[in-house]
Image: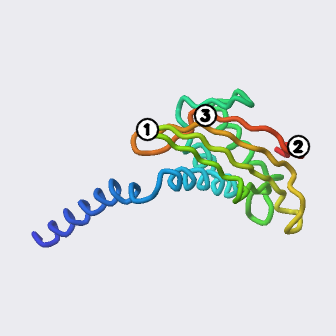
Amino acid sequence: MRNTRLWIVLALGALVVGWLVVPRLFPTETRIRWALEDAIESFNAARAGGVVAPLANDWYDRSTRATKDAVRGYLAALFLRKENRHGGRFRYQAEAIEESWRIQASGESADVSVRVQFRDAREAEGSEPLWTIDVTASLEERDREWLITRSGFEKVSGERPF
């Protein structure tokens, strides 16, 4: 019994150390990019909670004047509509353009810009995007995670399909 308790305590200790140390092994820019890529993957998988996860509670979008709660509600409704499903997945798919990432981090704040394209999953591979935008965001590190405090976008081409 004592042996089991010891292993449980050691395992919990390893988890805590891993939680504290491992993220610090990666550069700030990498951790920020991972958080934003996770949000894009959540959009593609129709998970509203994952999309808004990197948004600070006081987040505000300059382009739409939206708040975190408003976006969560909008996405939940969007993801639940039957006409937005295709082959068991969300009809619209987002993709950050690899070479467009720009991340400038300094201390506990960062600025990010990235071009994002939205496609219709019903269209053939390689089809033209429905909507392309340049996204800019300001982030702060709060409680060991990077959160978006302000963001905005500019349309590059197309029209918002949703």
Amino acid, disc 3:
Lys
Instruction: Report how far apart the C-alphas of labels 3 and 2 lie in the structure.
Output: 23 Å
Label 3 neighbourhood size at 10 Å, few (<14), some (14-19), many (20+)?
Answer: some
In the image, residue 3 above or below residue 25: below
Amino acid, disc 1:
Arg
Label 1 neighbourhood size at 10 Å, few (<14), some (14-19), many (20+)?
Answer: few
Instruction: Report how far apart the C-alphas of labels 2 and 1 lie in the structure.
Output: 34 Å
- Sequence-first tag of 2 and 1: 1
* Residue that carries the numbered disc 2 in the rendered image: 159
What residue is shown at x 48% (from left), y 51% (from top)? 28
In the structure shown, which secondary structural element does the residue marked by tag 2 occupy?
Answer: loop
In the image, residue 22 above or below residue 150: below
* Residue that carries the numbered disc 3 in the rendered image: 68
Q: Which mark is residue 142?
A: 1
**Left or right: 96 with respect to 159?**
left
| Image quarter hosting the N terminus | bottom left
Instruction: Report how far apart the C-alphas of labels 3 and 1 lie in the structure.
Output: 16 Å
Give residue 128's position: percent from left, percent from top: 89, 58
In the structure shown, which secondary structural element does the residue marked by tag 3 occupy?
Answer: helix
In the image, residue 55 above or below residue 27: above
Give residue 109's position: percent from left, percent from top: 50, 37
What residue is shown at x 71% (from left), y 53% (from top)? 100
Choose between 42 and 38: the one closer to the eye: 38
**Left or right: 81 with respect to 109?**
right
Work out which residue is located at the far top of the displayed protein and give it.
65
What residue is shown at x 60% (from left), y 50% (from top)? 36
Q: Which mark is residue 49?
A: none
What residue is shown at x 71% (from left), y 42% (from top)? 135
Label 2 neighbourhood size at 10 Å, few (<14), some (14-19), many (20+)?
Answer: few
**Left or right: 148 with respect to 96?**
left
